[in-house]
């Protein structure tokens, strides 16, 4: 049964339970709600919650556990002879899952019957051709062990989904029966409902933590798989980025240093644009602008934060690049060979970061107590002297935090780099040369010709893990500084 239909059935049972539970408790008091401990709606909510929560909890646990159980069972049955040199059982399982998905799509398109897809004696050459005809992404040849493993993978998943549907519906009905048995006038329905709702709110607040944990685990497992196939020393200290898709990494050089250098170089150029402009704008808006000007200028400045990054990338490619070429290109100073360069991406990214710096700095400057300004004026200082010697030093920790948050945003940018900086991975100090960043190469490695049985694709997860650690460190440091500043003045 499709997951959507299963959810709709549970919600229908919950809605029916709400109506019947409320009607039953009202019937027991003869329609006089004053004889009830709680409002009639709480009794209905009690039944609905006892239907929805156990059912959805079972659904969530099953959906998390079933892939691990199926993967482990199928992987254990793959013979060692089916694992090529330079690969691993985990990488072969990615081929099995992709083949299984291809079989599902081919059956849905009518290119093969369900019996043919499940037949263990099917010719794997015929299956490979049919999958390619269906437009499925498969390796050059689906081998017999992979085909058999994919068939078993499909059968186990289909069986698990069928059992899941039956169990979820049974749990929903059992929850409805449990709730209906509690429909007594003296039952403290309000207390139960409020306790359950509080638990749901706590669970909702935990989603961010669980999401972060899931992201980290997905990166960690694939990163470990990559380092089993490619030396960690060559990755972290290599100075050449030259992936080759002809083999399983034997001729590839996957040194991350050129990518990290490009990432930091472009980010530094962007911050050199964003920090002065954003900070000066924040000082003007908070100290010099009239309320009327501020009410207009600040929202207009923050509009920059809402522009999609692909638009900034097109602006870099079509406007900023040609302008720089006119000044620094062959017809100008001769420093620039093409419109895609570090300077092009850095300038546009700096424009994008201006509202991040200005808005945060403006709020931080405004939070400096007015008494500090008045004391400075009372000692005879001018307005500019008060800003330089009192306001900015007091707001400096928060401003540094804003700059660090903008830096982490710059490090994670992709589209501006792809369109404005080029794709060359090099170690160079020339800002008018094309370079690339970690994020740009993550995109190219996952959309290239490599499959997940090769380090050329798995390296994207190692790059992502490296970038995650860098940006996480910057964010933690920035939040620490901002929090320390706020504690000082609140």
Image (cartoon, grey):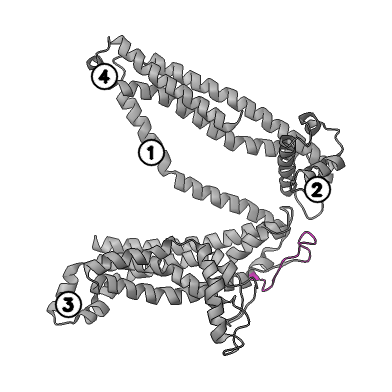
Question: Which residue is label 3 attached to?
Answer: 376
Query: Separation of disc 2 and disc 1 at Cα?
Result: 47 Å
Residue 37, numbered circle? 4
Q: Earlier in the sequence, mark 2 or mark 1?
A: 2
Mark 2, other Cα within 10 Å: few <14 / some 14–19 / many ≥20? some
Residue 201, numbered circle? 1
- Tag 2 secondary structure: loop
Indicate which label's residue lies in the foreground, 2 or 4: 4
Range of residues picked out in magenta: 237-251
Indicate which label's residue lies in the foreground, 2 or 1: 1
Q: Is residue 93 magenta?
A: no
Question: Which residue is label 2 attached to?
Answer: 83
Q: Quadrant of the C terminus?
A: bottom left
Determine if residue 296 is in view.
yes
In this view, which residue lies farthest toward the left? 378
Q: Which quadrant would residue 302 be assigned to in this image?
A: bottom left
> Do tag 2 and tag 1 residues touch (Cβ < 8 Å)?
no
Residue located at (58% from left, 63% from top): 439
Residue 474 against residue 381 in the figure, above or below: above
Q: Earlier in the sequence, mark 4 or mark 3?
A: 4
Query: Separation of disc 2 and disc 4 at Cα?
Result: 66 Å
Q: Which quadrant would residue 344 be assigned to in this image?
A: bottom right
- Tag 4 secondary structure: loop
């Amino acid at each position: 049964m499709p997951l959507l239909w299963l959810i709709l059935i549970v919600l229908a049972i919950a809605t029916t339970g709400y109506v019947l539970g409320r009607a039953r408790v009202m019937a027991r008091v003869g329609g006089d709600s004053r004889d009830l401990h709680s409002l009639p709606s709480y009794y209905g909510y009690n039944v609905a919650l006892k239907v929805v929560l156990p059912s959805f909890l079972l659904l969530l646990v099953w959906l998390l556990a079933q892939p691990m159980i199926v993967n482990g069972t199928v992987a254990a049955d793959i013979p060692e002879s089916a694992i090529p040199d330079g690969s691993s059982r985990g990488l072969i399982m990615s081929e099995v899952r992709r083949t299984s998905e291809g079989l599902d799509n081919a059956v849905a398109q009518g290119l093969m019957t369900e019996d043919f897809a499940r037949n263990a004696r099917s010719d794997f050459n015929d299956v490979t051709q049919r999958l390619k005809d269906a437009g499925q992404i498969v390796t050059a040849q689906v081998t017999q062990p992979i085909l058999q493993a994919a068939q078993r993978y499909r059968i186990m998943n289909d069986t698990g989904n069928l059992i899941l549907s039956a169990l979820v519906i049974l749990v929903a009905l059992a929850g409805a029966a449990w709730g209906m048995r509690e429909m007594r006038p003296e039952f403290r329905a309000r207390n139960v409902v409020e306790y359950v709702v509080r638990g749901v709110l706590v669970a909702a607040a935990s989603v961010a933590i669980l999401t972060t944990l899931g992201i980290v685990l997905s990166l960690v497992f694939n990163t470990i798989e990559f380092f089993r196939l490619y030396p960690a020393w060559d990755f972290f200290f290599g100075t050449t980025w030259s992936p080759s898709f002809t083999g399983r990494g034997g001729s590839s050089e996957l040194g991350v240093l050129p990518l990290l250098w490009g990432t930091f170089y472009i980010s530094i150029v962007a911050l050199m644009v964003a920090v002065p402009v954003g900070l000066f704008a924040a000082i003007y808006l908070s100290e010099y602008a009239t309320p009327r000007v501020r009410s207009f200028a600040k929202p207009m400045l923050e509009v920059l934060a809402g522009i999609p990054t692909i638009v900034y990338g097109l602006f870099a490619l079509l406007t900023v690049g040609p302008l720089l070429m006119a000044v620094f290109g062959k017809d100008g100073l001769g420093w620039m060979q093409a419109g895609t360069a570090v300077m092009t991406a850095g300038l546009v990214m700096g424009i994008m970061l201006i509202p991040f710096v200005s808005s945060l700095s403006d709020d931080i400057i405004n939070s400096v107590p007015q008494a500090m300004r008045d004391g400075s004026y009372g000692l005879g200082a001018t307005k500019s002297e008060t800003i330089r010697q009192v306001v900015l030093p007091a707001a400096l920790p928060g401003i540094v935090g804003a700059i660090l948050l903008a830096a982490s945003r710059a490090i994670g940018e992709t589209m501006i780099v792809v369109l404005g900086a080029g794709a060359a991975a090099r170690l160079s100090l020339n800002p008018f040369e094309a370079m690339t960043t970690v994020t740009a190469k993550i995109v190219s490695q996952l959309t290239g010709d490599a499959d997940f049985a090769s380090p050329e694709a798995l390296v994207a997860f190692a790059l992502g893990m490296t970038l995650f650690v860098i940006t996480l460190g910057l964010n933690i440091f920035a939040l620490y500084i901002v929090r320390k500043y706020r504690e000082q003045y609140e």
